[in-house]
Amino acid sequence: MADKRRKATSTKRKEEISELKAEIRNLRSELDLKSELKELQGLVKAPPVDVVVSENINLSSAIHQQQFDIARAHSTLPPPLELHPLCTRICLKKSWDQRSATLLSLREQKFRAAHEYITIRSQYSSSYSSDERFETANGDVCCSIFQTVHFPGVKSLKQVYDAVLFSMNNVEISICERLGHITTRDDYDCVDSSIYNARMISTDDMGVTTEVSGIMFSRFFDSDDRSFSDAPCGMLVIDSVDEDELCPYVPSERVRKDVSAAFVLTADHPQHDTLVVTLRRAAFVKLHYPEFEMSEGVWQELQQDVARWGDVTTRAIRSVLYSVP
């Protein structure tokens, strides 16, 4: 039997080195696999709070982007129309009979337009207040306002309606007390105790005088009167006179202010049978560019005050209902 040849020492060393390298590669592969598994386990076992925070950040970023897109689209929209749905061209003659006939002919039309506009305007809106302003080609400043006000804990819908009516009938007093503007009111027409035609002249602390010639229609629709709604509601509608032969505007001395507004009152019991009356108020105010000399600074200040009468009225209503200043 032939003798086996003995491997050279160098050959044996090469084989051992090769085997060791192969083992090292296997160990490294196992180590890499364990490391990957550990990372996956770390992701799976990540605290829920971290996941929620990450999702919230992504969601907030998406919402902000949508808001920017809406703002960008809104900037491309044309300005609101000068002729608001609450506005009606009204011309009054000198004859008292003709004036009364004109006002009576407008009454149902004004109630219908006011109720329809308020209903449509508030149908898909959750906003409590909006105020949009723009300037016309001839420099007039227009302001479109929509406001929702809740009066909780009141006795009845009629109580709030009476408070609104009282506040509107005495608005010149509230303007004097709360704004410090010297304000007078002249009543010209009263029809059926539900239609009033009056002119208000108000001078602010800068010495600028504005005048408003308006008509107010008011009615409380009880459960038997379902002209506009199945549920009781109260309505006050205001509109400006465009031309008055008896008492014309004086643009050479006063800044003309046109006001078209609607107040619609409804009642519900949202919680624990506590009565809450909701007032939805829409207004369109136009401040005519003065026909007499006025500095730009004074004109800017006058524009800032264009809608303050509405805020004064809301505070006056709260004062009547809750006996607060």
Image (cartoon, grey):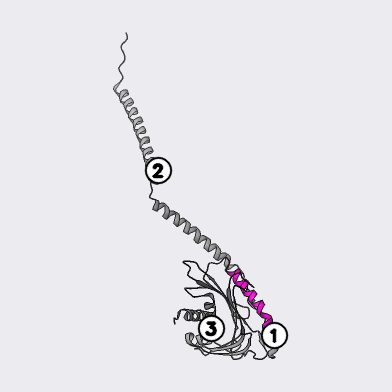
Which quadrant holds the N terminus? Answer: top left
Q: Label 1 to label 3, Cα distance in Å?
A: 25 Å
Number of marks drawn: 3
SS category of the residue bearing label 1:
helix
Q: Label 3 to label 2, Cα distance in Å?
A: 72 Å
- Mark toward the start of the polypeptide (3 vs 2): 2
Residue 259 belongs to the span the image colors magenta: no
Instruction: Please identify the dominant SS of the magenta region.
Output: helix
Circles 1 and 3 in contact, beta carbons < 8 Å: no
User: Which percent across, then down, holds residue 34?
Assistant: 36, 38
**Amino acid at pointer 1:** Ala
SS category of the residue bearing label 2:
helix
Q: Residue furthest left?
A: 9
Q: Which mark, by number, is residue 166?
A: 3
Circles 1 and 2 in contact, beta carbons < 8 Å: no
Q: Which residues are magenta?
A: 102-125
**Amino acid at pointer 2:** Leu
**Amino acid at pointer 3:** Phe
SS category of the residue bearing label 3:
helix
Residue annotated with mark 2: 40
Residue annotated with mark 1: 101
Identify the image quadrant of residue 285.
bottom right
Residue 106 belongs to the span the image colors magenta: yes
Residue at coordinates 36% horizontally, 35% vertically from top-left?
30
